[in-house]
């Protein structure tokens, strides 16, 4: 599945619908510190930190990628439930890693430290875990 990863600063009505579907399946802890998915999406678009995986003009996964001076942080990684297991999340993570490497910055996975899913993802991807 060829997934194209892009940074979103604006979103079409279809993109907004796709993003809402992506984060509708997210557990509550994944949305923190945002009140809900709509606020997370709006903040990501406004700050230019929202990256998304697109396949056939539809967004299937998204995350926030903060580009700081000393390190980059990937957070709020989520893939639509019906699309999971097809490499969309891996593609988002690999592209974030590539972009950070090209900028000469280390990439960290930012997530609640007490979430086993976050710990497992950090271990599988060999990314340092940084608490949100």
Image (tube, helix red, strand yellow):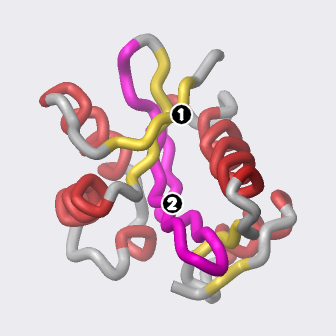
**Cβ atoms at labels 2 and 1 below 8 Å apart:** no
Residue found 61% across the figure and 43% down from its top: 92
What is the distance, in whole Å, between disc 2 and disc 1 at their CAs?
Answer: 12 Å
Tell which of 10 and 25 is nearer to you: 10
Question: Is residue 5 one of those drawn in magenta?
Answer: no
Residue 48: x and y, percent? Answer: 34, 55
- Give the overall secondary structure of the magenta segment: strand
Q: Quadrant of the N terminus?
A: top right
The image quadrant of residue 64 is: bottom left
Residue found 21% across the figure and 75% down from its top: 35
Residue 107: x and y, percent? Answer: 71, 67
Tell which of 25 and 122 is nearer to you: 122
Magenta stretch: give its range: 57-82
Residue found 59% across the figure and 75% down from its top: 110
The tag on residue 119 is none
The image quadrant of residue 3 is: top right
Q: Residues within 10 Å of mark 1 (few under 14, many from 20)?
A: many
Q: Taking 28 as reference, is 53 above or below it? A: above
Tell which of 62 and 44 is nearer to you: 44
Q: Secondary structure at mark 2?
A: strand
Q: Taking 90 as reference, is 26 above or below it? A: below
Tell which of 37 and 68 is nearer to you: 68
Residue 15: x and y, percent? Answer: 25, 31
Q: Is residue 12 left or right of residue 6?
A: left
Q: Is residue 59 left or right of residue 126?
A: left
Residue found 73% across the figure and 46% down from its top: 98
Question: Is residue 71 one of those drawn in magenta?
Answer: yes
The residue where tag 2 is placed is 65
Residue 37: x and y, percent? Answer: 25, 60
The residue where tag 1 is placed is 5
């Amino acid at each position: 599945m060829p997934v194209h990863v892009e940074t979103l600063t604006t979103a079409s009505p279809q993109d907004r619908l796709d993003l809402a579907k992506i984060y509708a399946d997210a557990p509550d802890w994944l949305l923190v510190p945002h009140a809900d998915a709509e606020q997370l999406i709006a903040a990501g678009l406004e700050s230019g930190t929202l990256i998304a995986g697109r396949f056939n003009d539809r967004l299937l996964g998204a995350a926030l990628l903060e580009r700081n001076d000393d390190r980059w942080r990937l957070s709020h990684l989520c893939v639509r439930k019906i699309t999971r297991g097809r490499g969309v999340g891996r593609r988002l993570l690999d592209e974030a890693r590539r972009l950070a490497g090209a900028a000469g910055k280390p990439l960290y996975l930012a997530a609640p430290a007490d979430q086993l899913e976050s710990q497992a993802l950090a271990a599988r991807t060999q990314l340092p875990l940084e608490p949100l």
